[in-house]
Image (spheres, helix red, strand yellow):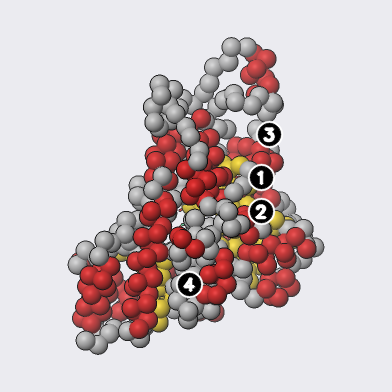
């Protein structure tokens, strides 16, 4: 673990374009020719390494990005997809069928929650949602039909931390596959190194980092990735959430700066979290000593990338949250928008946006309050100046006193 550095692993890969370009050429084709019919047959059967068949299955550009993301997560292989949900749903459907059961963290991205709660039961797959920080409750939820243990490293939006090492021990004890969505903490946490079997990202967020596309990836063993792409039975191949080659080439270029961006996101978020907590606001950030899992998270992270760029502030009421977000946007401090990992700070009230799929009573039970604002802290150059400007917005709305 000590010697594992995800950014160095990406950097150590070397690709050239076909004319010696410093970036690999983009494969601008949906289908590929064969010199012999026999090779085409063998490729269909999955027996021809290095031959391409059809771009829904794989393309040279997608394979470059697959390799880089597998290197980042320390898994044998990876498969990029058209969105984060396009990675999550085929992965779960590959692992589970009728009568199978999932134990999932209850604080997960609203879309994943809605899939497990509302859609998967149509296929006979049921889910028990639990508090992922209470390991005895997690273990008690496992039944003989359970196949998957599912969580996010740092949960959306409450920033709860999953103890991946201990969850993986539970998973192994019960012969389950531990699937971890690491979207909030790329580079900072390496879940596969902590025992996760499958690591998923929405590339839409930090990894691409420019809010210009959606994308996803599943990082796992070669065997599992092959099963996802199997022409007869693979959920990715058959459901078809394929990333376009042009997009994978552009995500690949943005991946080159991820390590620099994560350090700055973490630095800025830590700065603001410390200042606002001192000001008396209810501030949740895993880098703060007051975070219930601070000590655990500190041990889990690859230290140099920090505690990440996500932070929440509770400003009391939805009306105040909305007024503050509108005012901050008017002062160009960031955008009132869902998503995360942009150069600009993004903020939203999760209860009425990204987590609105979660019924109100369940939101209350998990501590998702009305006045909660989720911040994805941007890459601001002068974070003290940002703090002063945010603070004066809070004074204007009477969240803080002058
Ligand atoms: N996982 C997490 C933690 C997310 O926040 C999101 C999207 O917000 C997703 C998965 C889904 O990703 P996408 O929007 O790329 O499908």
Q: At 43% across and 41% down in the image, what residue appears?
A: 252
Image x and y of residue 220, in percent? 63, 47
| Residue 402 placement: quadrant | bottom left
Query: Circle 3 sits on which residue?
Result: 232
Q: Nearer the viewer, mark 3 or mark 2?
A: 2
Query: Circle 1 sits on which residue?
Result: 221
In the displayed structure, would residue 102 be above or below residue 402?
above
Q: For the residue carrying disc 2, how many other residues have a C-alpha within 10 Å: few (<14), some (14-19), or many (20+)?
A: many
What distance separates the C-alpha of mark 3 from that of mark 1?
19 Å
Q: On the picture, is 75 further left or further right than 374?
A: right
Query: Circle 2 sits on which residue?
Result: 197
- Viewer can see residue 101: no
Image x and y of residue 334, in percent? 27, 63
What distance separates the C-alpha of mark 3 from that of mark 4?
43 Å
Q: Do the CB atoms of the residues marked 3 and 1 lie less than 8 Å apart?
A: no
Q: At 37% across and 55% down in the image, what residue appears?
A: 261
């Amino acid at each position: 673990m000590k010697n594992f550095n995800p950014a160095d692993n990406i950097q150590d890969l070397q690709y050239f374009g076909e004319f010696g370009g410093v970036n690999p050429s983009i494969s601008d084709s949906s289908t590929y020719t064969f010199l012999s019919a026999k090779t085409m047959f063998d490729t269909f059967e999955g027996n021809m390494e290095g031959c391409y068949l059809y771009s829904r299955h794989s393309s040279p550009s997608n394979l470059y990005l697959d390799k880089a993301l597998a290197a980042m997560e320390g898994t044998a292989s990876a498969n990029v997809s058209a969105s984060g949900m396009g990675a999550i749903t085929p992965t779960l459907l590959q692992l589970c069928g009728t009568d199978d059961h999932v134990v999932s963290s209850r604080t997960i991205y609203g879309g994943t929650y809605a899939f497990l709660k509302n859609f998967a039961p149509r296929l006979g797959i049921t889910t028990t949602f639990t508090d992922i920080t209470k390991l005895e409750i997690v273990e008690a939820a496992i039944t003989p039909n359970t196949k998957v243990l599912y969580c996010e490293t740092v949960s959306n939006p409450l920033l709860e931390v999953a103890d991946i090492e201990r969850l993986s021990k539970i998973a192994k004890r019960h012969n389950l596959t531990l699937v971890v969505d690491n979207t909030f903490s790329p580079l900072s946490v390496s879940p596969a190194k902590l025992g996760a079997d499958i690591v998923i990202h929405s590339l839409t967020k930090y990894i691409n980092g420019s809010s210009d596309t959606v994308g996803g990836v599943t990082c796992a063993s070669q065997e599992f990735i092959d099963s996802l792409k199997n022409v007869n039975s693979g959920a990715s191949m058959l459901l078809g959430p394929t990333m376009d080659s042009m997009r994978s080439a552009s995500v690949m270029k943005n991946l080159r700066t991820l390590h620099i961006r994560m350090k700055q996101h973490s630095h800025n978020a830590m700065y603001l979290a410390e200042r606002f907590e001192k000001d008396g606001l209810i501030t949740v950030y895993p880098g703060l000593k007051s975070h219930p899992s601070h000590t655990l998270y500190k041990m889990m992270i690859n230290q140099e990338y920090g505690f990440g760029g996500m932070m929440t502030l509770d400003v009391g009421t939805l009306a105040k949250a909305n007024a503050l977000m509108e005012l901050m946007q008017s002062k160009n401090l960031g955008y009132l928008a869902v998503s995360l990992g942009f150069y600009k700070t993004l903020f939203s009230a999760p209860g009425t946006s990204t987590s609105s799929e979660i019924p109100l009573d369940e939101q209350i039970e998990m501590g998702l309050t009305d006045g909660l604002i989720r911040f994805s802290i941007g890459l601001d150059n002068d974070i003290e100046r940002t703090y002063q400007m945010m603070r004066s917005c809070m004074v204007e709305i009477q969240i803080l006193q002058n």
